[in-house]
Amino acid sequence: MKLVWFRNDLRLADNPALRHACADDEPVAALFIVSPTQWRQHKMAPIRQRFMLAQVDVLGHELAALGIPLHLLRVETFAEVPAVLADLCCELGVTRLYANQAIEIDEQRRDHAVTAALAEQEVSCHWLNGCCVLPPGRVLTGSGEMFKVFTPFSRAWLKALDEEGFVIHRAPAPRGEPLPWQPLAERAWVDEALGELTADPRWPVGEVEARRRLNDFLEQAVLDYGETRDFPAIAGTSVLSPYLAAGIISPRQCVAALQQRLGYRPQSNSQPGFVWLNELVWREFYRHLLVLIPTLSMNRPFKPETAALPWSWDPDAFAAWCEGRTGYPIVDAAMRCLNATGWMHNRLRMIVASFLTKDLHIHWRLGEDYFMSQLIDGDLAANNGGWQWAAGTGADAAPYFRVFNPTTQGQRFDPQGEFSRTWVTELADIPPAYVHQPHDWLRLKGRQDYPAPMVDHAVARVRSIEMFRSLEK
Ligand SMILES: Cc1cc2nc3c(=O)[nH]c(=O)nc-3n(C[C@H](O)[C@H](O)[C@H](O)COP(=O)(O)OP(=O)(O)OC[C@H]3O[C@@H](n4cnc5c(N)ncnc54)[C@H](O)[C@@H]3O)c2cc1C
């Protein structure tokens, strides 16, 4: 018997672990492990847990239809995983375990412990690359090191992809009679561990849904992406991040579909589609970094010298940022949107992260954790990479003297204030010209329902630059 352990790869199509396990006629079983305490320790957002479990339900049903039973195990933390897996392998007579490689340090340690525990039972473990287009470690500098800067990484990545190519694998064929599947909602222990399991109707699960979103995006939006991707009031991006984070769709499927749509694989900025492909390469960059620089999973800055920065931990200022009460409409709208929907546009992630770290001088780790606790697409590599980029502590980070001005960012990327007025309802009736500097208008109208700016950006900017300069002394 072979066992496929699903983790952040909740799909049948283009799943290397599943494909390898189904390569011959030997019986195959599948497994998903629910670990509520560990997920809480990793700050996994409840909306993301529900999204994942809703997908596990669909997957269990689809696997059962193929004659592959999906076993669900529950543990509190990863420490219990080797023992429960060893018991399951013993009970089912498993001789080979297949899974797609995890990249985060706790997950890697868990997987090493699993390999060791199962070796004692003569069960071999096969770890495959299912979460990246190219496996971490494949794209290195001439001296065999990880790239520290994105553009040369991107060039080397494209070259490596040309050399290696890749194939997309279909879902496996049925392997026996269809099996019954008991929905998760009927399993008392799942509900008890995770609370109400109702999935969010805004985020339907399923591989069909993920592919539908991808195809819709590729129809036209991908061609306009370079011009529209920075405007949160426009549906200019794919919104595939929750599906990529849970592995409902693979990055290879995205690259292959892009290539098929265009008839070529874009190689440079001048070719339509390249800007979007490059975002997928950013995803790869951060994932490769996380594997090759394990301290990134341990709350450490990529640039070690920035550990000495005198960050603030002010709880009141932090709460005002989390709740969208900073007095800067674009920041407040973005945070309220995150809190209500579990998702935020990339331009807004950059603006609010810059505001927290460079206007409020609050430690990026607080922002990183808060994002994780709210995002449906929470992903350690991209989130850590994004936060360290904004804070100026990361690989290829924004230079310390480049501090986003939240007012001009709002005026530039939400010029009519459509996005800001939707989420900051106090400003719903404000004329567009005043949206990003509403306080004079509000004062004239005698209104006090929207907070005054909590900091003077010009002053905060200078302090931020001084903070970084002090490192050089
Ligand atoms: C502070 C901060 C925190 C972030 N946290 C996360 C996170 O937890 N999870 C997450 O998936 N992304 C994160 N990002 C990256 C990016 O904001 C989101 O991936 C993007 O907004 C998702 O929208 P989309 O699916 O429409 O992306 P598209 O623009 O359609 O891009 C396609 C895919 O490429 C990947 N991608 C795009 N931009 C980036 C990027 N800058 N870095 C890494 N991957 C990227 C995503 O998987 C995305 O789905 C963060 C960025 C910042 C600045």
Image (cartoon, rainbow, N blue to C red):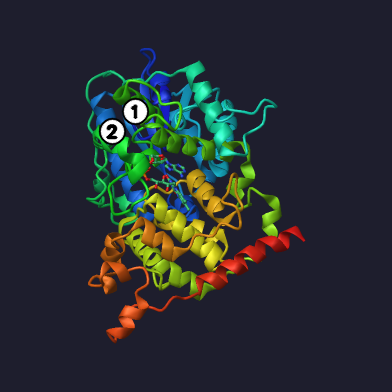
Q: Amino acid at mark 1?
A: Leu
Q: Quadrant of ligand 1?
A: top left
Q: What label does residue 218 carry, if any?
A: 2
**Helix, strand or loop status at disc 2:** helix
Q: Nearer the viewer, residue 240 or 219?
A: 219
179 with respect to 318 (left or right): left
Q: How many marks?
A: 2
The amino acid sitting under disc 2 is Leu
Res 267 label: none
Instruction: Tell me the quarter of the image containing the C terminus.
Output: bottom right
Q: State whether residue 445 appears in this view.
A: yes
Q: Is residue 415 above or below residue 278?
A: below
- Residue 336 horizontal/vertical position (percent): 34, 64
Q: Position of residue 394 (x, y in %)?
A: 60, 49
Q: Which residue is mark 1?
A: 258
Residue 350's spot in the image, x, y percent? Answer: 46, 54
Above or below, comparing residue 282 to residue 464 in the picture: above
Alpha carbon of mark 1 to alpha carbon of mark 2: how far? 7 Å
Q: For the view shown, which residue lies furthest in the bottom direction?
A: 446
- Between residues 242 and 434, which one lies in front from this camera angle? 434
Residue 272 falls in image quadrant: top left
- Taking the image as drawn, is residue 372 in sight? no
Image point (67%, 25%), residue name: 142
Check the image and report above or below for 259 versus 110.
above
Residue at 32% from the left image edge and 28% from the top image edge: 12
Task: Determine whether the residue tagged by mark 1 lies in a helix, strand or loop.
Answer: helix
Q: Is 98 left, or right, of 467 in this rendering?
A: left
Q: Earlier in the sequence, mark 1 or mark 2?
A: 2
Determine whether label 1 and label 2 are within 8 Å by CB. Answer: yes
Instruction: Look at the picture and state if 142 lies above or below 460.
Output: above
Nearer-the-camera pick, 44 or 323:
323
